[in-house]
Image (cartoon, rainbow, N blue to C red):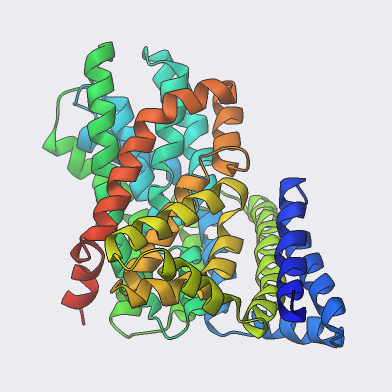
Amino acid sequence: MSPENMAILVLLGSFFLMVLIRFPIAYAVALSSLFCLLFQGLPLTTICQQMVKGISSFSLMAVPFFITMGCLMGSGGISEKLIALANACVGWMRGGMAMVNIVASYFFGGISGSASADTASLGTILIPMMVDQGYDDDFSTAVTITSSCEGLLVPPSHNMVIYATTAGGISVGSLFLAGYLPGALLAVSLMVGSYIISVKRNYPKGEKFSVKNLLKQLSVSFWALAAVLIVVVGVVGGVFTATESAAIAVIYSLIVSVFIYKGLDWKGVWKVLEGCVDTLSIVLILIATSSIFGYCLTRLHVPELAANAIINITDNPIILALLLNLILLVLGCIMDMAPIILIATPILLPIATSIGLDPIQFGIMMVLNCGIGLLTPPVGAVLFIGSAVGKVPMERVVKATLPFYICMIITLLLITFIPGICLWLPTLFG
């Protein structure tokens, strides 16, 4: 075996071994890169250089702002307002509370950008509410965790910023626009699945639809929804960059949470900021360590080797597209979302573009694949959060989630083979 192949074996072998024994992912990435550099006899100063290079990006400055915005809005009394708005929209249907859960996740996801935050914030309110109205607890939890993945697609999503930075040369504004229709398609797919189950189990309907109530709730929720408009309209309209829009959105979120909805006092704001620092430190450590890993992969020509190996299996673009989805789904079962984006993008994006997939379309595919991974054992973070919030054993939650996995896979396939779902809005707005 050549020295280069041995170095690849050291890098990837040690990484997957540490992942399997449940090492923290940032340490697994950093240590496997360290072993690879030592094996090649390279100076260890490369580690510091690549870590600094990985986080020295103007675009990545948007990530802490978006995380802070989501934490402020999520703790500032926004959840109840969005649930009331969703109830006014779809609560009248059979299985109305399940529909409310899904639509509220679409609204809230556009604010938090995090499936975990969505599950923790809305789940604590909606799961007990659904159980009290006669819904099964495992079904209520399954609806909550699957609908939380809408927040990964609906802008502003800090994971899209990470993908745009990793892929290079991709407009964050275009990615934001590309997420709206796939997010709505996922919501509709989950609503259809929920309706079928609700009819079969005879779950209750809500109150009759009222235009007056809808307008009332829309006026109350306007301040929350306006945060998304500030970010998306500002970026797409060229008024300011993604980083500038995120900073403005943080100030706006602080004003809305403290002075308009009054869900936070200044003491509460400091507690929220402490939580933001915890979350942000995890994300930035992952980005920094993944930069070393990416350097090793590039130096060893792993992206080219992987691309050739996959393309040699078949030259059928349909099978290759399905194979890319399968690889991402498997990775999602054993890794968290940010490291998958950081590590897999340089390897898989060239293959995706070679079979005609647009980089923006592939970014949406990757985000949804990673979202499904958040719901699958053994690493699925959202699955664990939902199980804890709903106080339902994980085995029952997984079983109840099976029909919704089907809905999500159908949505993924539609996004993969109908590019217009992702590209229509970015094309429309140029």
- Residue 22 in the image, given as x and y percentages of width and height: 75, 46
Q: Against 4, is 317 above or below? A: above
Residue at x 42% of width, y 39% of height: 146
Q: Against 98, is 104 above or below? A: below
Residue at x 55% of width, y 53% of height: 331
> The N terminus lies in which quarter of the figure?
bottom right
Visible in this render: residue 219?
no
- Residue 139 in the image, given as x and y percentages of width and height: 41, 22
**Residue farthest toward the front in the current orientation of the protein:** 1
Seen from the viewer's position, the closer of residues 365 and 165 is: 365
Q: Against 70, is 160 above or below? A: below
Seen from the viewer's position, the closer of residues 144 and 239 is: 144
Residue at x 44% of width, y 73% of height: 349
- Residue 174 in the image, given as x and y percentages of width and height: 32, 75
- Residue 16 in the image, given as x and y percentages of width and height: 70, 56
Quadrant in which residue 209 is drawn: top left
Visible in this render: residue 122?
yes
> The C terminus lies in which quarter of the figure?
bottom left
Residue at x 51% of width, y 47% of height: 373
Horizontal relation, residue 69 to residue 212: left or right:
right
Q: How many marks?
A: 0
Horizontal relation, residue 31 to residue 303: left or right:
right
Horizontal relation, residue 59 to residue 269: left or right:
left
Seen from the viewer's position, the closer of residues 124 and 153 is: 153
